[in-house]
Image (tube, grey):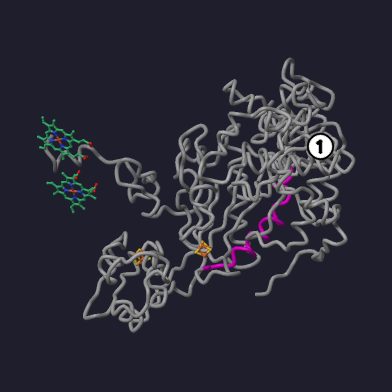
Amino acid sequence: MAFEPKRPQKKLDYQELRLFTDEELKNYTEEEEKNFKIKHDIPELEQLESGPWPSFVADAKRYALRRRKLGQDNLLINQDVVEDLLGQVELSYVHGETHWKHGGIVGVIGYGGGVIGRYSDVPEQFPGVAHFHTIRVAQVPSKFYDTDFLRGLCDLWEYRGSGLLNMHGSTGDIILLGTFTDQLEPIFQELAQVLDVDLGGSGSNLRTPECCVGKARCQYALYDTQEMCYEMTMHYQDELHRPAFPYKFKFKFDGCPNGCVASIARADLSFIGTWRDDIRIDQDAVQGYINGEFPPGGGSHKGRDWGKFDIYEEVINRCPTGCMSLEGGKLVIDNANCTRCMHCINTMPRALKPGKDTGVSLLFGAKAPILEGAQMSVLVIPFMKAEPPYDNIKEIIDKTFEWWMEEGKNRERLGETIQRVGLQRFCDVLGVPPAPQMVKEPRSNPYIFWKEEDVPGGFKRDINDYRSRHAR
Amino acid sequence: MEELKKAIVEFCESGKTKTKFYFKDIEKAVKDKVPGAKTLQIKKACSALINEGVLIYYSTGSTTMYGLKGKGITEDH
Ligand code: HEM
Ligand code: HEM
Ligand code: SF4
Ligand code: SF4
């Protein structure tokens, strides 16, 4: 289905947006760069430039030179912000402690997220970073931008902020690093009204949803990750901008179990594309791989000679559930035992394709270590259809939010709430029957227990009747 | 709605040393005071108070709290 925007899409033209001329954007020579010294001594930081990798220190110094040459008249916040940033970071290296103050009342009108307030605790020494607030800008699904937008954004940020940015943060947002409080409203107005983009999430809210490249470029996509990510972003605007959750909450959308946005490790609710019918097999192409006619893995390991392709070594014996075999020269898959890991399909993409009855698996509760250790999402709903308007999935999301807002403690992620009260309780809330895939291993954490009403005759027994047949 | 707003403001005024509150704590206090109040209604009332400039958001970046404008830290430090 073709993409249908929920509101008219704006066509941006950098020539209309631009704030700086080409000369201003390339305003120093190599010679000047070589001789440039920032206003603070930063030996500890400069040590980082000696490694084999490109260094943020070298980048920042180069950019500091550009700001100097642009001059304070062309910039709305302190011209020396980058130099003072390096100076303060140097001081932190020397002291072995941070000089940032944490948190505050910064934001834009009506929004509870998107701006993260930071202040220097040594502002006399480094006035350029007295305020150093971060702005999160929502990325578009799969991060397809046009260059007019990107150049417009860079000019705006150079003019009203530090000019330093991060494409993209681990949240998925574009991260604009460092500006002063009085610039927040004007920047937001420019972003929203001119560049036609929204702020991302921060604080106790739904964070900017993120998806893999999906059907835009990937043959494996089992549902339209971009469409679904966009729909959920628009549908849950209130959750995104008006924080009232116990803590943060993340959605991420992977088109298939290859997991290019790592939803299973990073999202409180991970959507992973899957299928419920059989893997499609082209037996001639299987023979082609065996005979060495096609490079395995689409040629992705061509850099070195790995020897002749061995279907047992590289596919059949590597199937995690051992559900594949070669019988009379034909590849056989016991689909009931296939766990949809993608390995065989990735290795022989010409011969094997996922089934045609596709949808998503819903896994809940991944998070990085804060209260408890790092946790992966746990499979709760093995299969749901994923088609617009996704009412079946929204129903599950609404139940999850409602329960977690009720049951979750302050600063407790969904995964921690589930761990505290038990997965069985969460399954009951969603109305999901237990499945063997929810059990990590027998005995140590079966999670799911019989309830009395599930057992014919209940848990009560007549002990005398029992003893009449069994000795003590 | 007005009843909920009143209960929210009363709760935020009642803090002796605290000036910033988690939504959950506001929610609990309001539910005690206004039986039958629903979580989403309380959230709506908080948003309305924010828009009216009575309440403000306070964020560390990872968590968000609510406070009365003018009480405790409200301007730049
Ligand atoms: C229809 C009859 C039986 C069924 C359905 C059954 C089922 C099971 C199951 C599901 C387990 C757990 C397996 C695991 O944790 O991986 C188990 C373990 C065990 N069963 Fe049975 N069982 C049966 C009969 C018996 C009998 C007759 C004996 C001994 C006389 C026995 C001795 C054991 C032992 C010792 C274990 C523990 C094995 C271990 O920890 O590795 N079972 N049984
Ligand atoms: C000095 C004697 C023994 C020692 C030190 C011993 C030790 C153990 C240990 C450490 C386990 C593992 C427990 C667990 O991780 O779940 C175990 C399990 C088991 N033992 Fe023993 N054992 C002894 C004698 C026996 C005898 C005499 C029997 C049977 C007649 C027996 C039957 C079992 C069974 C069936 C299990 C599996 C229970 C389960 O996994 O649920 N053991 N034993
Ligand atoms: S997660 Fe799957 S569908 Fe999405 S880009 Fe990666 S391989 Fe393709
Ligand atoms: S997808 Fe994974 S589990 Fe399924 S048959 Fe292929 S290798 Fe085995």
Q: Which residue appears at 31% of the width and 70% of the height?
A: A334
Assign the magenta stretch its main secondary structure. Answer: helix
In this picture, residue A336 sits left or right of residue A260: left
**Magenta part of the chain:** A221-242
Q: In the image, is residue A266 above or below residue A150? A: above
- Name the residue nearer the viewer: A163 or A32: A32
Within 8 Å of ligand 3, the CB of disc 1? no
In this picture, residue A79 sits left or right of residue A300: right
Quadrant placement of the C terminus of chain A:
top left
Q: Position of residue A293 (x, y in %)?
A: 34, 80
- Name the residue nearer the viewer: B58 or B67: B58
- Name the residue nearer the viewer: A252 or B43: A252
Whether the magenta-drawn stretch holds residue A235 is answered as: yes
Whether the magenta-drawn stretch holds residue A338 is answered as: no
Badge 1 density bin: few <14, some 14–19, many ≥20, Cα 10 Å: many
Q: Is residue A206 visible?
A: yes
Q: Which residue appears at 77% of the width and 56% of the height?
A: A151
